[in-house]
Image (tube, rainbow, N blue to C red):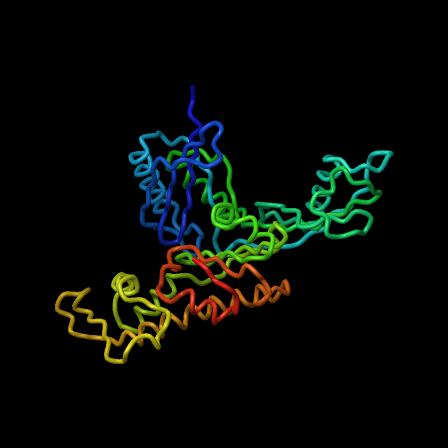
Amino acid sequence: MSRNIITALDVGTSTVQTVVAEKKKGENSLRILGMGISPSAGVRRGVVVDLGETTASIRASLEEACRSSGQPIKSVWLAIGGSHISVASSRGVVAVSRADGEISHEDVRRAIAAAETFIPKNPNKEVLHLIPRDFKVDNEPGIKDPVGMHGVRLEVDALIIECATSFLKNLFKCVESAGARIEDYVFAPLAAAEVVLTKRQKELGVVLLDLGGGTSSFIVFEEGVPIHAGVLPLGGGHITNDIAIGFRTHVDVAERIKVAYGSCLPTEHHKREVVRLAEFIEGEQTSYSRRELAEIVEARLRDIFELLHKELKKIDRAELLPSGAVLIGGSSLLPGLVDLTKREIKLPVEL
């Protein structure tokens, strides 16, 4: 009997991650068999800028996942992110087809197809997802599933998540060159939300923020469906670059300093607490204040939260999401981040 093996691949700015899992019959959850993580090269702000380097990084991650899981990797589900992602809204309207006015699955499908036809045609853009946010039956809004209801006119309001066609082709080329076939692809925060957010959080209203290396992506849910999403052009790599400039040191050293001593709350550190560069560079005598380090980290994170606040303001949800914000991603591990986030976006926050 063949096993149902699923492999997921996430090509990020700082790392390439592969997870191999098994779906057993009769079980809802997946069993993780193995994973592979390799440093990412050839990717900037989530976009492939060097095909050869990116292919090598993907191959290294796939090979490690193959070894740790003991499973050959033939195909992958691909997570899509990066600064090229764009979000739009669209509406589709159709007449209910049945004579008795009962709305069928086919009517819903036609309404969604109509919403797609209203998107301005752009050969440089590829639709990743078209997600119905809300249906109207004879101008009555707030309907989540109209199938079986009666009416004359069916309208859908949909969220469109698009990405650059050239980016998608380049990424596909790298994955296929690394020896894997692409089974399907998904906007990364949408996949993460399936794992991280509860049904109740999605109903009440919540924003999921993934603090990545080159970008930070987010998705907002309300009444169980995504109502907004996007990618912010700042991430953990920008914090590292700021530390490298502030401490006049190499980027690799700055990353190690961030991981070892990084914090978001300057007031929690005494002025006499220092970071000695000798710990990271042999013979280097310079020392810097830990409070100064925390100020650098805090300043860049405040920029990210300011951008997120503006996005929430666009949909009139700034400070108005009862389930608050859920933080994921490498940079979410910075000490003091929950307190800083609460202060900046004025919402409940959890990791």
Residue ID at (31%, 66%): 262
Relative to 291, residue 328 above or below: above
Is residue 296 or residue 39 the one in the foreground? 296
Residue 236 sits in quarter: bottom left
Relative to 252, residue 138 above or below: above
Q: Position of residue 174 (x, y in %)?
A: 41, 41
Is residue 338 or residue 314 the one in the foreground? 338
Residue ID at (39%, 52%): 43
**Quadrant of the drawing holding the C terminus:** bottom left
Residue ID at (40%, 50%): 12
Name of the residue lying farthest toward the front = 200
- From the viewer's perspective, is 130 left or right of 253? right
- From the viewer's perspective, is 106 left or right of 318? right
Relative to 238, residue 125 above or below: above
Residue 332 sits in quarter: bottom left
Is residue 344 or residue 121 the one in the foreground? 344
